[in-house]
Amino acid sequence: MKKLLIIATAVLSLGGIAAADIQAPPGSEYTATRKLSRAISNILYGFMEIPTQVVRVTEREGPHAGYSFGAVEGTNRALRRLGYGFYELFTFTCPTYRGTFRPPYEKCGSDNRIEMDVVGGLAEFPPQLGFQTYYSHTRTQTY
């Protein structure tokens, strides 16, 4: 009986080890390839900040502010994106932010979006214009 108890305990403990939940470390999604893709995205699509800021400022403060201040703010953000893009393009093989490939962004605001800097508020990737959906449900039926 004692041998059976020892064998059962060993089998259960080994089974528990084999079924352990192994998770990736928190920084594992930020790699050199993600940094390179962030750089290319900021260089190629950073100019999208200009119409995005015109629309945002127009909705918030009216059309006169949107077409003047929004255009200037969008150009400022687009040029900063271009600078960050070239910086990350030249340093994508080096872990530059605290020894990792993470962007030098901080969580900001009540919705905890990742921001490049608190003052300017650049997101990790450039904005997209037009309709976007993050849901994959449709009314079609598949068999």
Image (cartoon, grey):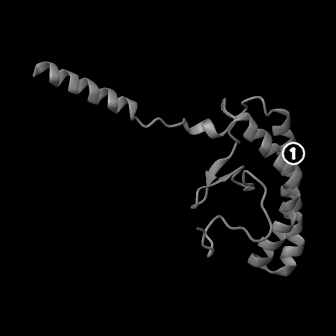
Q: In the drawing, does residue 17 fall left or right of residue 97?
A: left
Amino acid type at image mark 1: Gly
Q: In the drawing, does residue 17 fall left or right of residue 108?
A: left
Q: In the drawing, does residue 104 fall left or right of residue 51?
A: left
When the figure is inspected, residue 122 is found, relative to residue 138, above or below; the finding is above
Q: Quadrant of the C terminus?
A: bottom right
The residue where tag 1 is placed is 83
When the figure is inspected, residue 94 is found, relative to residue 126, above or below; the finding is above
Q: Nearer the viewer, residue 85 or 133?
A: 133
Q: Residue at x 60, y 72 (%)?
A: 141
Q: Residue at x 87, y 45 (%)?
A: 83
Label 1 residue SS: helix
When the figure is inspected, residue 57 is found, relative to residue 110, above or below; the finding is below
Q: Quadrant of the N terminus?
A: top left
* Image position, residue 128 (x, y; %): 79, 63
Q: Nearer the viewer, residue 45 or 82?
A: 45
Q: Quadrant of residue 104?
A: top right
Q: Quadrant of residue 26?
A: top right
- Label tally: 1
Q: Extreme top residue here?
A: 3
Q: In the drawing, does residue 63 fall left or right of residue 15?
A: right
Q: Residue at x 86, y 68 (%)?
A: 51
* Image position, residue 5 (x, y; %): 16, 24
Q: Nearer the viewer, residue 3 or 134?
A: 3
